[in-house]
Amino acid sequence: MTFPKELTTVTTLSKYLAMVVFIALPFVGFFLGMRYQEMTDLANKEDENSMKACTQEAMICPDGTSVGRQGPNCEFASCPDEKPSICPTPPTCPVGKNLIYGDPVPSEQNQCARYQCL
């Protein structure tokens, strides 16, 4: 099968058309792909800031009450009325001496031990 000479001749128009198809289109596609990636990353960041559901777990506090998960990181809430210990910390004994615990001393609701270095 033979084609007419007009269809098989390389012309200036065919060179420019080939340049557009094989050189420019890949760069345009890469640029558009980068823009699309930026838009999806931005959408994902907005989704992270929105509300999300936490699992329905409960933590039992020392006083017997329970607290659930809350907040953006789904962390357990603080237990109510947690009071720090009011007992003094044991002293640091010098080298060669041992820390001895004495009889407990009642203080409010805790039993604090007496400390002595011997």
Image: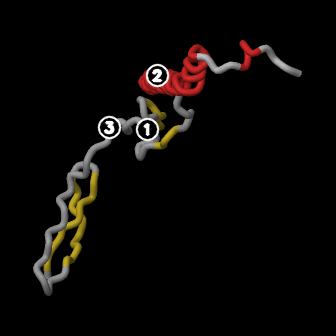
The residue under the point 14% across, 83% down is 97
Query: Disc 1 versus disc 3: distance between alpha carbons?
Result: 15 Å
Nearest to N terminus: mark 1 or mark 2: 2
Q: Amino acid at mark 2?
A: Arg
Q: Nearer the viewer, residue 20 or 35?
A: 20
Farthest bottom residue?
96
Does the CB distance between marks 3 and 2 fall below 8 Å?
Answer: no
The dot on residue 81 is 3
Instruction: Identify the residue under disc 2.
Output: 35
Q: How is the image coloured?
A: secondary structure
Quick one: label 2, few (<14), some, or many (20+) residues within 10 Å?
Answer: few
Tell which of 41 and 51 is nearer to you: 41
Residue 2 in the image, given as x and y percentages of width and height: 85, 20
Residue shown at the point (37%, 37%) measured from the top left = 78
Tell whether 72 sits left or right of 2.
left
State the residue at coordinates (58%, 21%): 15
Helix or strand or loop: what does disc 2 sit on? helix
